[in-house]
Image (cartoon, coloured by chain):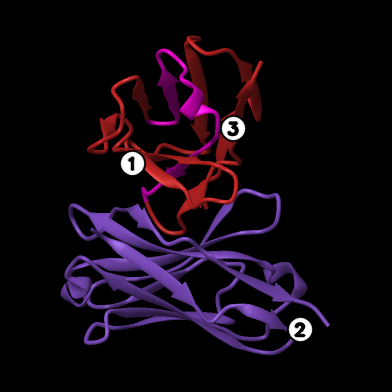
Amino acid sequence: DIQMTQSPSTLSASVGDRVTITCRASQSISGWLAWYQQKPGKPPKFLIYKASDLESGVPSRFSGSGSGTEFTLTISSLQPDDFATYYCQHYNSFPLTFGGGTKVEIK
Amino acid sequence: EVQLVESGGGLVQPGRSLRLSCTGSGFTFGDYAMSWARQAPGKGLEWVGFVRSRAYGGTTEYAASVRGRFSVSRDDYKSIAYLQLNSLETEDTAVYYCTRALTVDGAKYYFDHWGQGILVTVSS
């Protein structure tokens, strides 16, 4: 099974900051990676697929990059609505797995 | 608007069974694969199970942690996906989410819409 490791687990940042979250796969997944945002008490919201393709309606301050085993989610200028937990998920093969999550909190 | 609504959760004793339902609307249900994920209290997301659309054989996939105990099925006429949970353990306590799965080629799937989730508590 492919393991997904996110870092950091918690990130403290201020509004306007550039934020980068890393997701590493235990083996190559090509570009088969998705990112989700989750706020407390809410279901996850789909952000990015195929490592870098933005879902319709997702603000352009979000971007994804990477291939193979290392991927990043970047928020170019953190907004108040962006404080949440972010998860990566590979879909290279079954079983599908999520990273452990990165909580972005207010500094 | 795509909507997924879960039902059937609640409190159940260890070793017992439960069936969750996910009713989809706002899209042609039969054209999409459907999946279930869960989130234990204060923990991260865990993928649980998956059923392909009829076009891709309607076959299923499961996480190792639930294989043999849980099963996913679908009724395209009713636009409902099911998750049958058998031999429940206290570690199965979680919010269970129904998701719609997108694919380009029938082999790679990711989740573009999620239900609100439903709590399953396994306790004596």
Name the residue carrying label 3: A102
Q: Specify the segment rendered in magenta.
A: A68-92
Q: How far apart are marks 2 and 3 (CA)?
A: 32 Å
Chain for colour purple: B
Which is closer to the viewer, label 3 or label 1? Answer: 3
C-alpha separation, residue under disc 3 versus residue under disc 1: 19 Å
Q: Which residue lies furthest to the bottom in this view?
A: B16
Q: Which amino acid does label 1 sit on?
A: Trp
Quadrant including the C terminus of chain B: bottom right
Considering only vertical position in the picture, is A47 above or below B37? above
Q: Residue at position x 52%, y 47% from top?
A: A98
Q: Subunit of mark 1?
A: A
The residue sitting at the front extreme is A80
Q: Identify the chain drawn in red.
A: A
Element assignment for label 3? strand
Residue B3 drawn at (x, y percent): 32, 63
Task: Identify the image quadrant of residue B73.
Answer: bottom left
**Seen in the image, is B90 located left or right of residue B9?**
right
Q: Is residue B92 above or below residue B106?
A: below
User: Which residue is the site of mark 1?
Assistant: A32
Is B85 colored magenta in this rendering? no
- Whole-percent x, y for residue A37 in the image: 47, 39
Label located before the other in sequence (3 or 1): 1
Chain letter of the residue beneath label 2 in the structure image:
B
Question: Residue A88 in the image: x percent, y percent?
Answer: 47, 39
- The amino acid marked with disc number 3 is Thr
Query: What is the number of the mark on residue B14?
Result: 2
Q: In this view, does B42 lie to the left or right of B75?
A: right
> What residue is at 70 percent from the left and 80 percent from the top?
B11
